[in-house]
Image: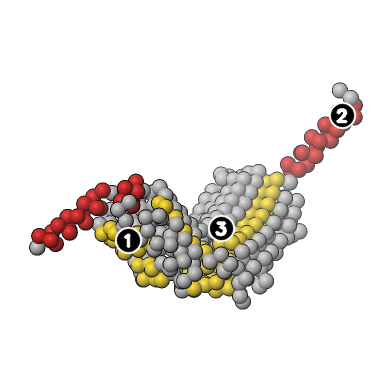
Amino acid sequence: MPFLFYLALIEAREKRKAENSEILHEINASTVDLLVPSYITVIEKGASMNATLLTSVKFEPFSSLTRIGKYAFANCPRIRTIDLSLCNNLWIIQEGAFFNSSLEIVTLPSSLKYIENSVFELSNISQIEIPRSVIVIGEKCFFKSSLQQITFQKHSLLSEIGPNSFAETFLFSITLPDNLKNIGYSAFTRSQLHSISFETKSNYFEINNKMIIRSQTKQLVASFYYEQESITIPDGITEISKGGFLLSPIEDCKFPSSLLYIRERAFAVSQLVNLTIPSSVKLIDKYAFHNCYQLRSLVIESENTVLADNCFGSNFQLCGINCPIKMIDRLMKVGIQPFSFQKCISKISEKNMS
């Protein structure tokens, strides 16, 4: 082996050792109060997995921390607060970092850019301020958490909110940054939201009767209904996006003649009772009206509407069907049970006999 090559191998090995010493791989099982040294750059995946006694986490001044790894503090039953404000090099908190933890209050640093999927999912976090620097809030970030209040710093750079990010939280109101470009499906499903607004005026979205609409394409991307009511989709809407009314309490929905597409799970597990699909609709995507257990009547105006798999599956109360004859076989193929038609025939016969 050439001598210089041998020296290079040794140098590389020593470098790996040095780098490894800057990573916190595992927190000792007996640790109660953790002080993270300033030289630590990474808290590794599942670092606290065995640290069931861990009560507090603090950081030395001039922290070098850049990343909190996946599920690093997940399932920690004793941590109530954590202050990351001294971690001025921290740019990412990875998936599930505080998943199902008892964390109630967290202070985030001004260097943070990415809060990944499920970071605070099922946590006890009740309030949080999102720094201006944050660009992405990931899927299910606050899903089923105790979140009641969220504040975005002025002139926020936030560009994307992931699917189900605030679903099933206790938020009453939220003011979104103007820079926000993407809102994932079901972002606010089954929350307690009464109002959503933007900091000044969004260039990408508009809000109309608790519906968030993409201004340029007229896609209805999300809704935030918290009690039973009847609604009318605004004229001009061309598409109801995936999960737009998922688990919604709305009982009746009137569609505009401009509507072209009803996407996947758009009204799945909603409380719809009566439904009329206008002739303008080209596609009802898979599971669009799946598990609408209260649905009683269905009208489909056009035989040209394409029905995807299971778009009407498991609607066991449905009995009033009005559609072109050519649609009957297709409806049975996409989830409507034959007895739904039989009930209708039986009711018509009884009415005629009387």
Q: Residue at x 55, y 72 (%)?
A: 206
Which quadrant would the N terminus be assigned to in this image? top right
Would residue 294 be visible to someone looking at this image? no
Residue type for callout 3: Gly
- The residue under the point 55% across, 55% down is 139
> Does residue 6 appear to the left or right of 246 in the view shown?
right
Image coordinates for residue 352, horizontal then vertical, percent: 13, 61
Q: Which residue is outermost to the top?
A: 1
Q: Is the Cβ of the residue at disc 3 closer than 8 Å to that at disc 1?
A: no
The image's mark for residue 5 is: 2
Say which label, 1 or 2, has the lower sequence index. 2
Going by the numbered disc 1, the residue's amino acid type is: Val
The residue wearing badge 3 is 162
What is the CA distance from the residue labelled 3 to the residue labelled 1? 34 Å
Direction from residue 103 to residue 280 in the image, left or right: left
Instruction: Point out which mark residue 299 bears.
Output: 1
Can residue 267 be seen by looking at this rendering?
Answer: yes
Residue at (60% x, 48% y) in the render: 70
Residue reaching furthest right?
A: 3
- Tell me the element at label 1: strand
In the figure, 328 relative to 179: above or below? above
Report if the CB atoms under discs 2 and 3 are less than 8 Å apart. Answer: no
Residue at figure coordinates x 23%, y 50% from the top left: 339
Crowding around mark 3 (Cα neighbors within 10 Å: few <14, some 14 to 19, many 20+) is many
Sequence-wise, the earlier of marks 2 and 3 is 2
Q: From this view, report whether residue 260 is shown above or below residue 4.
A: below
Q: Nearer the viewer, residue 325 or 89?
A: 325
What is the C-alpha distance between the residues marked 2 and 3? 48 Å
- N-term-proximal mark, 3 vs 1: 3
Residue positioned most to the left = 354
In this view of the protein, which residue sits in the foreground, 351 or 40? Answer: 351
